Amino acid sequence: MELYEQTIHDLQSQLQARQVSSAEITSSFLDRIASTDPSINAFITVTKEQALADAQAADQRLATDDCTPLTGIPVALKDIFLTEGVRTTCASKMLDNFIAPYDATAWAKMKSQGAVLLGKLNQDEFAMGSSCENSAFGPTRNPWNKDHIPGGSSGGSAAAIAAQQAVATLGTDTGGSIRQPASHCGCVGLKPTYGRVSRYGVIAYASSLDQVGPMTRDVTDAALLLGAIAGHDPKDSTSVDCPVPDYTAALPQGAKGLKIGLPKEYFIAGLDPDVQQAMDQAIAVYRKLGAEFVEVSLPHTNYAVATYYLIATAEASSNLARYEGVRFGHRAKDTAGLIDLMMQSRSEGFGAEVKRRIMLGTYALSSGYYDAYYIKAQRVRTLIQQDFIEAFKSVDLLLTPVAPTPAFKIGEKTADPLQMYLSDIFTIPVNLAGICGISVPAGISSNGLPIGLQLLGRPFGEETILRAAFDFEQATDWHTRKAAL
Amino acid sequence: MSINQHEIEHVAKLARLSLRDDEKQLFTEQMEAILAYVETLNELNTDGISPTSHAVPMENAFRPDCVTPSIGHDRALANAPDKNETYFRVPPVIE
């Protein structure tokens, strides 16, 4: 097996036994990126020199036995994470030349544990999108079929795993942006509970929904990486101060005895037959593993997309007010005074979807509409959250599809934003409720595209969904399937 | 609820966006469709339901009020499109 095909836990044992060096592993990935990325476009920036230097430092550290599970492991980050001294664009022309002045906490933690940075990954601009087509640096292609989208917004983070360009990546998930691309690219994607991982240094889209999480080849790596980045951060006042367990220790506990809820609103007539079949097979696997199933109801599911597109855009319109062409980012030339400078800089720097969401959010917050739209959506958010609280009174976790269909074609939904928004129906409620969810590979469609299974847990119930995901992975071989490149 | 081009221009001004004519027309149509969709929320009676602004119940996060190292002028100004010594430079605000 090539070095670039392996997991964190595979490589770590070889690194610690000195069977391989971080420099060799890192070179293997850099070569792989050079040969595959011209057709995938998962990377916006490849940090080759820094990666080689980091790898050398990691090798010295490995020689001293002062090492962690991440020491010497080459990773890549969605270009929404600030990385000190490295260009950070958020896939926007607005930040084309922005060099981050400090590190995001999630990356600072990985860096201090010896992880090696391969580069920064493509995404939808400012994380606004479900297909990775809204990037100022061109769309990312799905390694399983290059005519299809990889999902979004963390499309580059998922495609890089599927194309074996990094051992693991970080993404962010505001309405499904880790789980949906993980599902479409056949990798594992974990959206932790809101507050589990610091958002400091993560470029803000919708602050009450954004959460950082790992994207990996298997569940063990997701557990390892979550443990490495989780925890309270004084620099993010919304990060929660509760202990970080050893997530890998929970994995062997298995799915036996778990009570799994099937929300009836997620198993609808319009579900793609291949997705339905994958869910049926997954349920059968879990029954064999000793899990028990019950039907539950999340009655406000159908209102989640509307709620999300009011709350997320309102928060975005406020967050993105900081891009005014004065302190950093794009500045328009030949403008007539300060206000014109701001208006022209924003109009030139933002892409169409970002402008659309700023407009919608500004409208929802504007005088005369605030109560009818924004406050109404916040009240419905309470109902959606209560649906989950009610369901978790009778079950340990929920099992659902990640997306109603496998990855759609590039260009298929770009003309109709509302259709694009509706493709996130099964992931959005999770962010509104603030709970945790994981996508694991659970099938391949008739046209050869991966299908993911979503497991949802209580707030701070990551151990439960991880152990259930791990048991499924042990009982199936979907995670070993690879995109033919 | 429908939205017309005049309202789109007003919202664009609030958002400090200068839209081209084709963008104004496109956003009018698309926002009309999106707003018609979000009208479905009015099917729900939310009287007496309190709004959720944050998913995790939290108290205010306080910290001691003491001086700690900050980012410093050089790094703070490193990405400035235009600067003068220790300031961001902008066009004249008051003539």
Image (tube, rainbow, N blue to C red):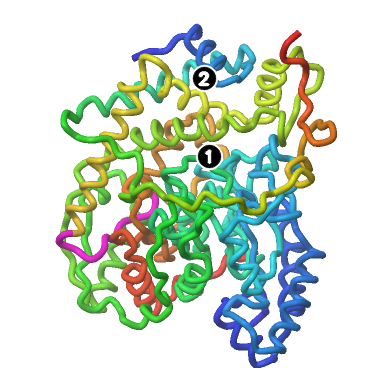
Q: Secondary structure at mark 1?
A: loop
To which residue does mark 2 refer?
Answer: B27
In x, y percent, where is residue A328?
72, 36
To which residue does mark 1 refer?
Answer: A128
Which residue does the image show at 16% across and 57% down from the upper left?
A295
In x, y percent, where is residue A247?
41, 75
**Viewer-proximal residue among A262 and A199:** A199
Q: Residues within 10 Å of mark 1 (few under 14, many from 20)?
A: many
Q: The N terminus of chain A appears in which quarter of the rendering? A: bottom right
Three-letter amino acid code at the position of disc 2: Phe
Q: Secondary structure at mark 2?
A: helix
Q: Residues within 10 Å of mark 2 (few under 14, many from 20)?
A: many
Tell me if residue A177 can be seen: yes
- Mark toward the viewer: 2 or 1: 1
**Viewer-proximal residue among A119 and A7:** A119
Tell me if residue A452 can be seen: no
Which residue does the image show at 76% across and 60% down from the upper left?
A47
Q: Residue furthest right?
A: B85
Magenta span of residues: A393-403
As drawn, A293 above or below B95: below
Three-letter amino acid code at the position of disc 1: Met
Q: The C terminus of chain A appears in which quarter of the rendering? A: bottom right
Which residue does the image show at 17% across and 53% down from the upper left?
A390
- Residue A484: image quadrant is bottom right
The answer to whether residue A445 is left or right of residue A157 is left
